[in-house]
């Protein structure tokens, strides 16, 4: 871990753009530090985020750098973390709350749904709720029960929220900065399987990425492959391995709410074929929303049925059988083959 | 001497806790309005007259709002009949820059805080603009009416943390009902307030009924106030129908909080003389006899008796006050009825600062739907 770079206050901030080699977790830490440096309204709260730096170390070094007033260890109470964040945001701070695992996020729902997402609407713009809730999500790390879920669709259904999922260090950095700058609440889900998976080069320029735009990672003409989060890793690998046989356009959805349908539409009009890959359960997943959009607006352009390759409608199995739930490169290649052969 | 066995240890502990944790309500005015103990507030003529006027205005507003619901001019409305002393004491104890974090039965506090009656009616008349307070209504961070029970307690500790971080010398006042004291949000908020020594005051309006569930079903604790003790929060009970005592404790608690002396919990004992809301029929679950008894302890008559006896008030002042209340109500109802509904597309306008581009189709669909269905539409 390039921790000396991350911790050094002189090496973060908008003034200098330094190229760093960072993993996704370090990119998150860097974005948090950058935002806290720039804007004193930014505060962090959560369980074990202070001296311990978070159970994954996403907030490592931030309490010693910015003090206990701005990096707050809370009691072990997720409802209060979310509710207090609502109060802080209304009162002029920009709180970033960490929920230790997405499996523990359910206790926050009343505050997120009934208050954070509605405060602007309820008060006709008098009060706003510019908060970020960060949570690691997804499986594949041999964790205990409740530590592997992907329930992004729960939040995507709620008017007033934004749901953002990065899949590379650079996008984690830029999208987190954008989430913090957002005047509206953002659920920021971090694919924990990618936290330390690979290092990529990243420029610490303090620049936010757009919060309503997909990222086209590979351009292609035969098939549109749409995914987000940790599954992007396998998607990239498959696309590169079979690039001589099939020309695939790979889209990282990145902002699950709102969805950038313009980019998706342009791609489908070009390729006529679509595979959607997500780790979350199939029924009412984000894949269903994308497939429905294609069915509603793009049928004349489709050469084959849309294929959804998703988690099953089951509880994520405990880790001895986790691999049979997770989506592999073989599964993705298979879905691509089926869709390439498909027709109406 | 250490006890020999667990049984005797337990009974000793219980005796000790009962003795320590029994919180007795503070009361200055007897139920009939006689001064029980001397207090500077009881001699503050201006304070008492102001409180008495606001309590009367609150009750008049309440009666009017219920009548407006009955005639379909506003929607479901939760009356605060009988709990005017608590609401008005809260409003008068707050300073402009403090943050008020209400539940949904705080009409009196909102009126004292400068909220226009027509805006309160607008909220209960089903219009979001009722919570778009103007600069004259409360402070810039006063929260809107909170319907999900006890969730406001979590927001209150968040606002209190913000005030502390921003080093602002203000306090937060959070109100809730007896039912809300059973919810985790409230208990978690107490816990955080105690742990972080936050400038927040919680006032439980214990009106004995959470819709149809009576106080004794709500909790086995002899007082709701003692729920604060485990969080190391000074916690007291007050007779919430005694305006003088209620104002005294809330003011003191707020000034403590402003001086960074930490949080307080106040359980104000009152009684819900009305149905839960206009959609409720309390005769299904409680005896009229109980309500009749409660009427004898109601707060307005009690203060009226005292201020008449002190010579602070007389019949002419009373007649003028009632006339003023009616006049203000008439004006406000008229103003409320003149406010036209928002355009239907407004439902999109405040979800995000700038709406996502995929809203465009839905906004257009909304406008078309409005035109198609206007005046009943054509099948």
Image: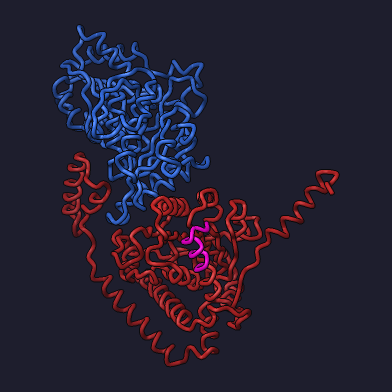
Residue B175 seen by the camera = no
Task: Please tell me which residue lies in front, A203 or B90.
Answer: A203
From the viewer's perspective, tell me whether residue B369 is left or right of residue A141: left
Which residue is most to the top?
Answer: A244
Which residue appears at 31% of the width and 12% of the height? A334
Left or right: B4 with respect to A58? right
Q: Chain in blue? A: A
The magenta region covers: B250-262
In reply to whether residue B256 is colored magenta, the answer given is: yes
Closer-to-camera residue (B146/B266): B266
| Residue in the foreground of this view, choosing between B342 and B247 | B247
* Residue A51, horizontal then vertical, whole percent: 48, 34
Question: x, y percentage for residue B102?
Answer: 43, 60
Name the residue at 24% across, 49% down: B348
A292 in magenta: no
In terms of image quadrants, where is residue A138? top left
Q: Is residue A64 above or below residue B218?
A: above
Q: Tell me the colour scheme of the image.
A: by chain
Please report the residue visible at 20 percent of the width from the left and 7 percent of the height from the top. Answer: A245
Residue placed at 62% from the left, 79% from the top? B37
Eyeballing the image, is A1 above or below A83? above
Q: Position of residue B4 (x, y in %)?
A: 86, 44
Q: Position of residue B76 (x, y in %)?
A: 39, 63
Residue A181 falls left or right of residue B271 = left
Looking at the image, which residue sits at the far front? Answer: A10
Q: How many marks?
A: 0
Q: Main secondary structure of the magenta part?
A: helix
Would residue A321 be visible to someone looking at this image?
A: yes
Query: Chain B is shown in which shade?
Result: red
């Amino acid at each position: 871990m390039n921790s000396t770079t991350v911790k050094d206050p002189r090496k973060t901030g908008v003034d200098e753009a330094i190229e760093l080699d960072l993993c996704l977790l370090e990119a998150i830490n860097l974005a948090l530090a950058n935002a806290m440096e720039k804007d004193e309204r930014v505060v962090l709260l959560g369980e074990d985020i202070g001296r311990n730096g978070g159970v994954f170390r996403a907030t490592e070094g931030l309490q010693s750098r910015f003090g206990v007033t701005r990096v707050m260890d809370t009691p072990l109470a997720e409802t209060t973390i979310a509710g207090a964040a609502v109060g802080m945001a209304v009162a002029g701070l920009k709180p970033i709350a960490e929920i230790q695992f997405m499996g523990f996020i359910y206790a926050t729902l009343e505050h997120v749904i009934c208050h954070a997402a509605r405060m602007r609407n309820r008060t006709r713009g008098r009060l706003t709720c510019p908060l970020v809730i960060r949570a690691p999500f997804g499986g594949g790390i041999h964790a205990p029960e409740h530590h592997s879920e992907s329930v992004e669709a729960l939040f995507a259904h709620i008017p007033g929220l934004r749901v953002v999922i990065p899949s590379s260090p650079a996008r984690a950095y830029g999208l987190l900065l954008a989430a913090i700058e957002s005047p509206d609440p953002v659920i920021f889900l971090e694919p924990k399987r990618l936290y330390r998976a690979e290092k990529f080069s990243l420029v610490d320029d303090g620049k936010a990425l757009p919060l309503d735009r997909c990222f086209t990672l590979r351009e292609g003409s035969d098939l549109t492959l749409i995914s987000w989060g940790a599954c992007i890793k396998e998607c990239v690998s498959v696309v590169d391995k079979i690039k001589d046989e099939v020309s695939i356009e790979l889209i990282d959805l990145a902002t699950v709410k709102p969805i950038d349908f313009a980019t998706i539409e342009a791609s489908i009009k070009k390729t006529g074929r679509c595979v959607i890959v997500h780790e979350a359960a199939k029924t009412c997943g984000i894949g269903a929303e994308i497939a429905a959009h294609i069915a509603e607006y793009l049928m004349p352009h489709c050469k084959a049925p849309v294929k959804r390759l998703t988690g099953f409608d089951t509880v994520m199995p405990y880790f001895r059988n986790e691999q049979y739930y997770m989506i592999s490169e073989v599964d993705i290649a298979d879905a691509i083959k089926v869709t390439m052969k498909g027709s109406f | 001497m250490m006890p020999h066995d667990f049984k005797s240890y337990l009974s000793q502990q219980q005796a000790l806790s009962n003795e320590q944790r029994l919180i007795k309500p503070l009361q200055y005015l007897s139920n009939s309005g006689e001064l029980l103990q001397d207090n500077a507030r009881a001699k503050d003529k201006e304070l008492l007259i102001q409180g008495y006027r606001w309590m009367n205005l609150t009750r008049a507003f309440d009666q009017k709002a219920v009548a407006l619901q009955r005639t379909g001019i506003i929607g479901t409305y939760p009356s605060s009949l009988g709990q005017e002393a608590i609401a008005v004491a809260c409003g008068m104890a707050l300073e402009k820059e403090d943050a008020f974090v209400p539940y949904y039965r705080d009409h009196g506090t909102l009126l004292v805080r400068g909220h226009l009656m027509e805006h309160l009616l607008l909220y209960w008349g089903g219009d979001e603009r009722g919570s778009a307070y103007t600069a004259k209504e409360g402070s810039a961070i006063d929260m809107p009416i909170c319907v999900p029970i006890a969730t406001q307690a979590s927001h209150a500790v968040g606002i209190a943390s913000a005030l502390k971080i921003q080093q602002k010398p203000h306090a937060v006042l959070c109100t809730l009902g007896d039912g809300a004291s059973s919810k985790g949000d409230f208990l978690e908020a107490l816990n955080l307030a105690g742990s972080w020594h936050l400038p927040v005051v919680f006032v439980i309006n214990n009106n004995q009924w959470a819709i149809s569930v009576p106080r004794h079903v709500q909790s086995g604790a002899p007082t709701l106030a003692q729920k604060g003790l485990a969080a190391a929060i000074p916690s007291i009970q007050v007779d919430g129908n005694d305006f003088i005592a209620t104002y005294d404790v809330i003011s003191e608690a707020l000034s403590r909080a402003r001086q960074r002396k930490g949080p307080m919990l106040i359980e104000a004992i009152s009684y819900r003389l009305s149905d839960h809301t206009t959609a409720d029929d309390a005769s299904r679950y409680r005896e009229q006899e109980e309500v009749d008894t409660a009427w004898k302890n109601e707060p307005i008559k009690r203060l009226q008796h005292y201020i008449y006896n002190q010579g602070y008030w007389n019949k002419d002042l009373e007649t003028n006050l009632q006339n003023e209340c009616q006049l203000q109500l008439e004006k406000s109802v008229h103003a409320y009825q003149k406010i036209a509904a928002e355009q239907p597309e407004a439902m999109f306008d405040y979800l995000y600062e700038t709406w996502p581009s995929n809203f465009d189709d839905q906004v257009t669909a909304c406008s078309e739907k409005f035109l198609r269905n206007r005046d009943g539409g054509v099948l």
